[in-house]
Image (tube, coloured by chain):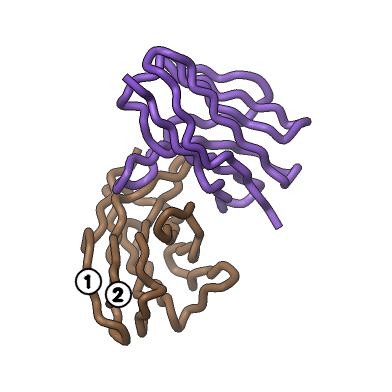
Amino acid sequence: SAVISQKPSRDICQRGTSLTIQCQVDSQVTMMFWYRQQPGQSLTLIATANQGSEATYESGFVIDKFPISRPNLTFSTLTVSNMSPEDSSIYLCSVDQGSKQYFGPGTRLTVT
Amino acid sequence: QKEVEQNSGPLSVPEGAIASLNCTYSDRGSQSFFWYRQYSGKSPELIMFIYSNGDKEDGRFTAQLNKASQYVSLLIRDSQPSDSATYLCAVQAGSYQLTFGKGTKLSVIP
């Protein structure tokens, strides 16, 4: 399976600021996904990011709050904008390989 | 709305026993089924996948699928303390999107 890295691994941010999370894959993949996992909860899909097209957002998530870039087949970024304490969560990127999804190590975000 | 249900646990089993984890799903069009293991503070790791009715075995793990009953399970034989984790059931229907259950926390007691 692909090797996936994320930066930063964790961060503590003040409310009202923005944080950009990077996801790097060691091989080219068509589909990348961004998930959120709130404390004690399961995974919720934020959006699907395909290279060369706009990200597709799930219900409850909007581009102004979570802008996503996908400049090439190995890289994507997710920005969490105008953060509030409710955005404190783990953010995970995943990739589809052979119709199976594999996850990066995650970014633990705390908003104070 | 697509739903995936799992008992939250915790499920406690003694070392060496069989752990049985269960999952039901609402979308009859679901085609692919996955089990992820998530250790505390870590990201989910894919451990099993199954597409057809019946059993699929991989080492100590067996995934079982019954589409008529909309039921998928994961059996872990000879459970070890290192198997202690949260197990997430995920279901895929047609598109690439996965729907996750809330997970079952497994504790293997030495």
Could one spot residue B36 in this view of the protein?
Answer: no
Residue A12: give its label: 1
Picture coordinates of residue B78, whole percent (x, y): 41, 13
* Residue A85, image quadrant: bottom left
Q: Is A13 situated above or below A98? A: below
Q: Is A36 situated above or below B59? A: below
Residue at screen point 31% across, 26% down: B82
Local secondary structure at mark 1: strand
**Marks 1/2 same chain:** yes
Q: Nearer the viewer, residue A77 or A75?
A: A77
Marks 1 and 2, how far apart at CA: 6 Å
Colour of chain A as rendered: brown
Q: Chain of mark 1?
A: A
- Whether residue B1 sits left or right of residue B108 in the image: it is right
Picture coordinates of residue B2, whole percent (x, y): 68, 53
Q: Is A31 situated above or below A71? A: above
Picture coordinates of residue A25, whole percent (x, y): 29, 52
Q: Chain of mark 2?
A: A
Picture coordinates of residue B57, whole percent (x, y): 51, 17
Local secondary structure at mark 2: strand
Residue at screen point 70% across, 27% down: B66
Residue at screen point 59% across, 40% down: B6
Amino acid of disc 2: Val
State yes or no: discs 1 and 2 in contact (Cβ < 8 Å): yes
Other residues around mark 1 within 10 Å, as few (<14) / some (14–19) / many (≥20): few
Residue at screen point 29% across, 48% down: B41
| Residue for badge 2 | A111
Amino acid of disc 1: Ile
Residue A96: give its label: none
* Residue A68, image quadrant: bottom left
Q: Which quadrant does the C terminus of chain B fall into?
A: top left
Q: Which chain is purple?
A: B
